[in-house]
Image (tube, rainbow, N blue to C red):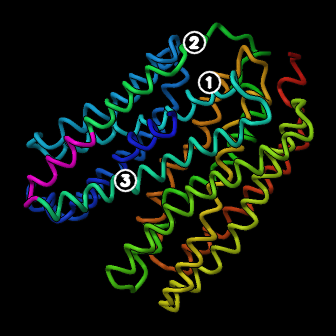
Amino acid sequence: MNTLVVATGFGTMHMLEKFKSVVVSHYGITEAAMGYQQTAYVVGLFVAFLLGGTSLFKGSFKRSVTMIVSFAAIPQFLIPFVGNWWGVVALRFFQGFIVALIAVFSNQIGRLFLAERPFAKGIILSGIFWGGIYGINLAKWASHTYEGWEAVKIAFLISAVVMYAMLALWWLFVEDFEIPKEKHSSRRTNVWKMPFTWVFGFTFFPALWIIFTLGSFTLHHAEFTDSQTANLVMALEISMGLWSIIMGYLGYRLSLRNTSNRGLFKAIVSVMVISYAVTLLGLVFVWKGISASDYTFALLGFAVAGIVQGTGPAFWTTAPAAYPKEIYPEASFALGLISNSANAVAPNVMFVLVSSVAVGMGIYMAMPIIGILLLLTASRMKLPVEELGE
């Protein structure tokens, strides 16, 4: 149920891009201006975690999920009727708040599971990519069935209704609970003043840098047919969705060996290191495919490099394993904010400052190495739960 809520919410991620020519014509904007809507969305992903440190997403779990879904659904209803392009850009910013579902669902998983946490989280996170595929195909269907701006209206209104319909169904089956509101933390229990929070928070930064820019960067520098490009985009989405589940299951199997806090953390680090190591191999294939305009190598590269998303299920189960239970909801948002700073930085670096394929791929190749080094550093640190006690 959580996965379907995530999937319908993240259907908003790429949908507007699929109507690029219609949108550019309707608003009389340039393609460069069109790109601002996606930048706004990605920045919204970052700000969502900043707000997670406030009381906005605390209290009733069901209320928090409803609010987060509404941040995506209400703009989805409004966008087809907004006459000003910058109004659309502003609404896309708020749609980025849908990512807060990931941290809120982490609190639920921490309550329900122990060793199973990475597997459950892997399934839920895969919804991001199933949602991307759903949004792309809904836009494709609308474009083939309706003309011009009418296609945009139909696709957006259908997807908004589906979001609320899925939320209503989810509401019927899910038990509510209270997400603790932030108390006045002492220096000892303030997650922001713990070195572990900063070191481990940045272990996921390289993965998000790759996840949110690799596809767009490489495709903009590749010479493939439109159908090949579409296949590559779909391959990357499917790859990341499947690897999320596969590596989540591996995390579950490793966690079964030792369900102590340290044992669960070792499983988390192992899964993330493996994911980063294999990602390096996939990036080599991507580089060869793009440089030589070799579609087969590019396809293979995207299929393998998608394992970078295998870091996600492990990372998002860290807070309940590494922090005392009274502060891990706050820690979950803190880790999310630090890691998602990549969303605010990576697009500007990769799309504005980097024009060379070699430089761009060099940056991508460095990211898994940085991730592994940070993980090895974090593995040698004391966990907050070990320092503060249960």
CA separation in Å, label 2 and label 3 = 30 Å
Side of 327 relative to 381 (left or right): left
Q: What residue type is labelled 1?
A: Gln
Instruction: Give the residue type at disc 3.
Output: Tyr
N-term-proximal mark, 2 vs 1: 1
Tell me, yes or no, whether the two marked residues, 2 and 1, touch with CB atoms within 8 Å. Answer: yes
- Say which residue label 2 marks: 177
Q: Residues within 10 Å of mark 1 (few under 14, many from 20)?
A: some
**Quarter placement of the C terminus:** top right
User: Which label number is shown at residue 134?
Assistant: 3
Magenta residue check for 92 = no
Label 2's element?
A: loop
Using the image, tell me which numbered label, if any, was put on residue 108: 1
Left or right of 35 on screen, residue 355 = right
Magenta range: 146-159
List the single residue furthest toward the top: 184
Q: Which residue is drawn at 51% across and 30% down?
A: 50
Query: Mark 3: which secondary structure?
Result: helix
* Vertical arrangement, residue 291 with respect to residue 353, above or below: below
Callout 1 secondary element: helix
Q: Where is residue 89 in the image (x, y as percent from the top left)?
A: 25, 44
